[in-house]
Amino acid sequence: MNPNVFDFLCRFRLNPIVFIADIKKTFLKIKLKSEDNEVIRFLWQFEEPPTAPKMLSFAGLKVLPFGLT
């Protein structure tokens, strides 16, 4: 999944114009409507199966989590 750094740098230098972006600043910037806060949830599992897993549900998010569609 990770690109080869040498190949990436070679391709980077072939073009006269290059675009770069700082996605760190866009992270957690998409706000949700207040009525949708309880709809988006994610679960955190404390123990791995086959034992009975302890789950914690996080809800009430005010921003869209990164990567969620």
Image: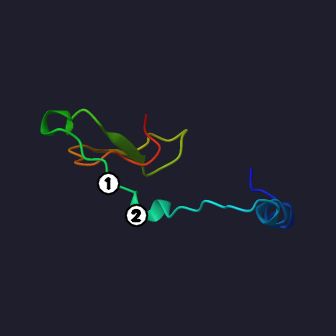
Q: Residue placed farthest to the front in the image?
A: 16
Q: Residue 42 at what x, y percent from top left? A: 36, 42
- What count of labels does the image hold? 2
Q: Circle 1: is it few (<14), some (14-19), or many (20+) Cα within 10 Å? A: few
Q: Is residue 50 left or right of residue 11?
A: left
For the view shown, which residue lies furthest in the left direction?
34
* Numbered circle sitting on residue 29: 1
- Residue type marked 2: Lys
Left or right for 45, reference 19: left
Callout 1 amino acid? Lys
Asked whether 35 or 57 is in front, the reply is 35
Residue at horizontal 28 percent and vertical 48 percent from the top: 63
Looking at the picture, does residue 3 appear above or below residue 49? Answer: below
- As measured in the structure, the alpha-carbon distance from the residue carrying label 2 to the one carrying label 1 is 8 Å
Judging from the image, the colouring scheme is rainbow
Foreground residue, 16 or 50? 16
The answer to whether residue 64 is left or right of residue 21 is left
Q: Residue at x 23, y 41 (%)?
A: 32
Residue 68, by quadrant, is top left
Q: Position of residue 23 (x, y in %)?
A: 48, 59
In-image side of 62 versus 67 (left or right) = left
- Position in image of residue 45 (x %, y %): 43, 47
Whether residues under marks 2 and 1 lie with C-beta atoms below 8 angstroms apart, the answer is yes
The quarter of the picture where residue 53 lies is: top left
Tell me the quadrant of the picture where the C terminus can be found. top left
Residue appearing at x 24%, y 32% in the figure: 39
- On the image, numbered disc 2 is attached to which residue? 25
Quarter-wise, where is residue 55 in the image? top left
Q: Which mark is residue 38?
A: none
Q: Provide the secondary structure element on which disc 2 rests.
A: helix
In percent of the image, x 74 and y 56: which residue is there? 2
